Amino acid sequence: MRFRFCGDLDCPDWVLAEISTLAKISSVKLKLICAQVLRDLLGDAIEYEKILKLTSDAKLESGDVKATIAVLSFILSSAAKHNVDSESLSSELQQLGLPKEHASGLCRSYEEKQSSLQDSLRACSLRLSQLGSVRWRVDYTLSSSELREVNEPLVHLVFNLRDGERGGMAAVPIAISADKFRVLLAELKQAQALMNTLL
Amino acid sequence: MCGIAGKSSCLPVLWKNTALSQENPVLQSAAVGELGRLAVELLRRGAAPRACEAAARKLNIGADTVQHGVEGLTYLLTESSKLMISEIDFQDSIHVLGFSDELNKLLLQLYLDNRKEIRSILSELAPKLPSYHSLEWRLDVQLASRSLRQQIKPAVTLKLHLNQDEDQIAQVLQTDPSTLLHLIQQLEQALGEMKTNHCRRIVRNMK
């Protein structure tokens, strides 16, 4: 059976297995656990003790609690990844065996946070490096060991790059003459115009 | 014949070790018990000089003697576990040391009790290639470059995260879709090899 929230593939076996664990928790508590899992997916700290308290009524073992969090993380992030609307998600979860109230509670939490989830997923997509900031300085060369009167402007640029691999900042310094700098600026303006046609 | 291959340097050390040559059988078994415990701890966690000093005080012998005894026993245990020698071979090997039967039995018991654990520790010492951790990917389309406008050039960028000796390294790769399809095809062929008769025969025999 192909599910949209799994990217038009079969649902993974472990997700199927844990649906019955989700059904053991009351639908109200499930909605609160969803809120915690969404906080974790959006980058805030998860409050594990609250989740433990919410699952204590259902008498879940610690392995089951972790499995619940994992299954909810998968369902919510996968649905956001494939841009599934909340009604389709609800019907697909019911097809997997999740009771109606649980599915609708889950999907209501999902709907509230769908666009923020997608924004945060977009932000952590693969990115090789990122420009942090640019600093510049214009100098005027008066004279050098090669020529007594040089009298030329010189531009110093420092690009601060956020290195995708290790997450540190790397500084790349460049010194350009005025002519080359004009060429660089013209080309970059052309690239910017092209980008604007796409936005 | 000595089943413990060639390296007979440990055997004279053990033989000269006065801790194990105690005449009193009670002291002997206490010494073997203590040294055996220290030897296994050395293999699990590394050197523990204070534990050796404590044992020396308890057994009333020099700390150096305890140290040498522990090292000798460690060597005996690792070589025997490495080669997975049978009980009879082990007994024949330590017979040359001329210890009492009691002591030989204690050493054999020490070997048999700890053999499995020592083998699992030794298996972690083998050199390892970098192993897969995760894969991030991105699909881009190049629309224009400085030299050419109005292009459509799709490209897939991959970042392969690998684990190597507790470090994480990342490798960035880029490919066009047709090479990616070829890559997928090759990998699926490799997986399919497991189902051939040749591989199945080998897997069956290994089990």
Image: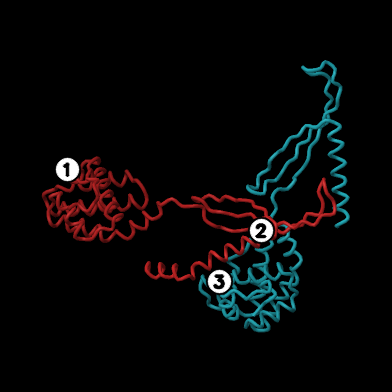
Chain colours: A cyan, B red
Amino acid type, callout 3: Val
What residue do we see at 57% from left, 70% from top? A52
Q: What's the residue at 41%, 54% (across, down)?
A: B124
Residue beneath label 3, please? Answer: A65
Label 2: chain letter: B
Q: Please provide percent x and percent y for residue B35.
A: 24, 50
Q: Real-space Cα distance between discs 2 and 1?
A: 67 Å
Which residue has dot 1 on it? B16
The image's mark for residue B179 is: 2
Spatial CA span between label 3 and label 1: 58 Å
Q: Which mark is residue B188?
A: none
Given contact means CB atoms under 8 Å apart, are the residues at marks 2 and 3 in contact? Answer: no
Q: Hey, what amino acid is under mark 2?
A: Thr
- Res. A179 image quadrant: top right
Q: Amino acid at mark 1?
A: Lys
Neighbour tally class for label 3: few under 14, some 14-19, many 20 plus, Cα within 10 Å: many
Name which residue lies at 57% across and 63% down. B187
Position of B28 with respect to A125 (left or right) is left
Left or right for B88, reference B179: left
Q: Chain of mark 3?
A: A
Residue B184 position within the rendered picture, expressed as x and y whole percent measured from the top left:
61, 63
- Label 1: chain letter: B
Neighbourhood count class around disc 2 (C-alpha, 10 Å): few under 14, some 14–19, many 20 upward = few
Tell us which disc is closer to us: 3 or 1: 1
| Residue lying at 84% horizontally and 39% vertically, measured from the top left | A184
Same chain for mark 3 and mark 1? The answer is: no
Where residue B108 sits in the image (x, y, percent)? Answer: 21, 58
Would residue B67 appear left or right of A57 to someone viewing this image? left
Q: Nearer the viewer, residue A62 or B178?
A: B178
Q: Is residue A168 above or below residue A70?
A: above
